[in-house]
Structures are given as structure tokens and as C-alpha cells.
Image (cartoon, rainbow, N blue to C red):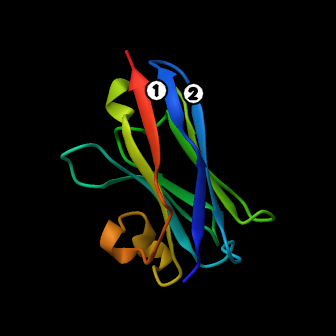
Amino acid sequence: QVQLVQSGGGSVQTGGSLRLSCTASAYTASNYCMGWFRQAPGKEREGVARIYTSSGSTYYSDSVKGRFTISQDSAKNTLYLQINSAKPEDTGTYYCAADYGIEGTYCSRAYPVDFRSWGQGTQVTVSS
């Protein structure tokens, strides 16, 4: 499976912005479902954004729609998550994930268990 290495994250005040990066060890610009998940203490890991790399189709949870943007740089094998208008409820550990076997029609609702490659996680803290 492809290896994923994350960077970015940190602390930001409410309304601020952050960008997370996730670099893959192999070519992921075709036929990959990739996503960003987050996990707050005591809560389950939830999907916030996904992209099917072949088509570039993107999917967002209702809680982040209009504020977060998932994108890819195929030349760098890198996935990004731009966080704008951050809210305290965005606080958590963010993970990127990828899987070659998830079809495009399912990518929008793929669960954490469906992904076989994960980044190491990065903390995002939004203070009020």
C-alpha cells in the first residue's frame, strides 16, 4: 500500500486558516479515493472531505462544506486540505487516507475501514 506522510496543522484562532498536506510514496493521481478524516477526543473518526483522483470529484461533510477545500497536486503526489473560517469544533487529530480499491461511485461515502493507507495524523487546535 502507498505510504502517506502528513505535514501542517497547529493552532489557530476562530476564523483563521490552516493548510494540511499529505504526500504519498507513489502515484495517486489515478483511480484513488483519498480523504481527510478527523477525530476529537472521545469521538469516532469522521470523514470531512474526500476526492476521487481520476475525476477530481470532491465530497464534503455538511459541517465543513464551504469552509474546507480538498485538492491534489498530481505532480507532487500530494493531497491538501485547506481549512478556512476555522471553528472550535474543528479541533482534533486530522488524518489523510487513500485506497486504490474504492470505486468512484462509493468514494463520497467511504468509511474509515475502507481505507488501507493512513497518514500519521496531525493535530489541529482552534481556540475561541
- Decide: is 83 above or below 75: above
In the displayed structure, does residue 44 sit left or right of residue 51?
left
In the displayed structure, does residue 67 sit left or right of residue 88?
right
Q: Which mark is residue 19?
A: none
Q: Which is more toward the observer, 29 or 106?
A: 29
Answer with mark 1 or mark 2, whichever residue precedes in sequence.
2
Whether residue 2 is visible: yes
Residue drawn at (32%, 30%), measured in percent from left and top?
89
Q: Which is more toward the observer, 35 or 116?
A: 116
Task: Please name the amino acid that badge 2 sits on.
Answer: Ser
Q: Name the residue under label 2.
A: 17
Q: Mark 1 points at which residue?
A: 86
Task: Please name the amino acid that badge 1 sits on.
Answer: Ala
Q: Which is more toward the observer, 118 or 30?
A: 118
Q: How crowded is mark 1: few (under 14 residues within 10 Å), some or many (20 or more)?
A: many
Q: Where is residue 126 in the image (x, y as percent from the top left)?
A: 42, 26
Q: What element carries label 1?
A: loop
Residue drawn at (66%, 74%), measured in percent from left and top?
28
Q: How crowded is mark 2: few (under 14 residues within 10 Å), some or many (20 or more)?
A: some
Q: Where is residue 112 in the image (x, y as percent from the top left)?
A: 34, 67
Whether the residues at callouts 1 and 2 have beta carbons within 8 Å, the answer is yes
Q: How far apart are marks 1 and 2 (CA)?
A: 6 Å
Quadrant showing the N terminus: bottom right
